[in-house]
Image (cartoon, helix red, strand yellow):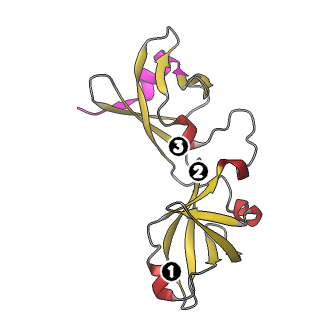
Amino acid sequence: MEYITVGEVLKAQGIAGEIKVKPLTASVERFKKLRVLYIDGKPFKIMGLRLDREHAFLKLQGVDNRNAAELLRGKFLQIDRVNAIELDEGEYFVVDLIGCSVTDESGAVLGIITDIFQNGGAVDIINAKGSDGKEFRFPFLNRLVASVDVAEKKFTVKKELLDEVCVYDD
């Protein structure tokens, strides 16, 4: 089964086993449509949900006290791809972009995407590793991206603009 990460457990909340979750989705409202989450491949039915502007508070089946909830701290909440939402044009799941080759418009391979840092409302930052082993980072800006082909694992950038905004490790 292929999973998509939707949140990270920050801490136990209260004494009844509730957990506080940092959403790793475009909207915390996404949690309203979920019924089951996976943690380390194990399914957990959602028994209760509260939301604030930035966090989800979940009560999971089988997590009945603070100690059990505390054991989940730092764990990632996932869904199976079958339950993933439909994305709009120009939207991508992070899991689909990691491993894509970064190429310029001439087809030259610049590196491989290794991670994407999401800064809570600010622009996402793409981290890639070049063929020389050095890492470089650049913002995920529409004007910088020439095309994205998830099926071919190819992320094409406009080299001239990339040179203006990219940060390279020494």
Is 138 situated left or right of 21 in this image? left
In the displayed orientation, state which residue is furthest to the bottom: 15
Please name the amino acid that badge 1 sits on: Ala
Q: CA distance from mark 2 to mark 1?
A: 22 Å
Q: Earlier in the sequence, mark 2 or mark 1?
A: 2
Q: Which residue is mark 2?
A: 3
Residue 51 visible in the picture:
no
* Residue 85 image point, x, y percent: 74, 49
Q: CA distance from mark 3 to mark 2?
A: 21 Å
Residue 114 covered by magenta stretch: no
Q: Please tell me how crowded label 2 is: few (under 14), some (14-19), or many (20+) other residues with Cα within 10 Å.
A: some
Which of 73/83 is in front?
A: 83
Read off the magenta span. 156-170
Q: Earlier in the sequence, mark 3 or mark 1?
A: 1
Q: Could you tell me which quadrant the C terminus lies in?
A: top left
Q: Quadrant of residue 127?
A: top left
